[in-house]
Image (tube, helix red, strand yellow):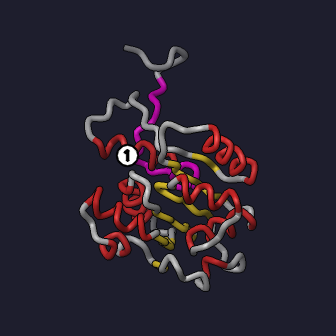
Amino acid sequence: MRIVVGITGASGAVYGVRLLEKLRRQPDVEIHLVVSKPGERTIFEETGRKLAEVRALAHHCYAIDDIGARLASGSFPTHAMVIAPCSVHTMGAIASGVTGNLLTRAADVTLKERRKLILMIRESPLHLGHLRTMAALAEMGAIIAPPCPAFYHKPATILELVDHSVDRVLDLLGLPDPEARRWPDRGRGGLQS
């Protein structure tokens, strides 16, 4: 299963890095990575990791300006694409069909080929333009999955909060993490104190 991962310059680079780490544990997944220039900086600023360390988590890496790469063609079969985190700049470019780099082109190809495109939008608060752009993308077939951690599993660390959102994306990909902490089923009443 080929999964394309894009990382943009929005805050929350840890979501993309953690997604790569969890995908790498899946033996039947082939990871293709594209990182924007701002994404490279944000990875370093927020995680202290250099791009080479993050690229080592993927099987195939591409330069952001390599619009001739195989990810730019619908004839290269992939299962899905996840952009984690996804900046509103990238979100807007994808929604308007502006494919000025490999990341936005790969997302455009994903949509036109009717494959899963999952966007972990990282922005708050949202103005009406953001919401309309998200609605347009949802109408095109994209899945809008902002990182929104839950607290029912009583997270004790930041990583547990991050993992909750990443695990939801893995579920959307059909690659559930067997260690994911899920809503406890305690009968008809749900959670009990």
Identify the residue shown where x is 42% and y is 70%.
37
Which portion, as a residue range, is magenta?
Answer: 169-185
Using the rendered view, name the quadrant where residue 153 is placed: top left
> Looking at the picture, does residue 167 appear above or below residue 13?
above
Q: Are there few (<14), some (14-19), or many (20+) residues within 10 Å of tag 1?
A: many
Whole-percent x, y for residue 10 in the image: 44, 55
Whole-percent x, y for residue 136 in the image: 72, 48
Q: Which residue is mark 1?
A: 162
> Looking at the picture, does residue 84 appear above or below residue 55?
above
- 74 displayed left or right of 148: right
Identify the residue shown where x is 28% and y is 60%.
45
- 36 displayed left or right of 155: right
Q: Quadrant of the N terminus?
A: bottom right
Whole-percent x, y for residue 175 in the image: 53, 55
Q: Quadrant of the C terminus?
A: top left
Q: Amino acid at mark 1?
A: Val
- 79 displayed left or right of 33: right
Identify the residue shown where x is 36% and y is 40%.
161
| Magenta residue check for 130 | no
| Magenta residue check for 178 | yes
Q: How many marks?
A: 1
> Looking at the picture, does residue 34 appear above or below residue 161?
below
Give 43 or 20, whichever is nearer the viewer.
Answer: 43
Please tell me whether mark 1 sits on a helix, a strand or a loop. Answer: helix
Main SS of residues in magenta: loop
Identify the residue shown where x is 58% and y is 63%.
81
Give 179 or 125, whichever is nearer the viewer.
Answer: 125
Whole-percent x, y for residue 130 in the image: 61, 44
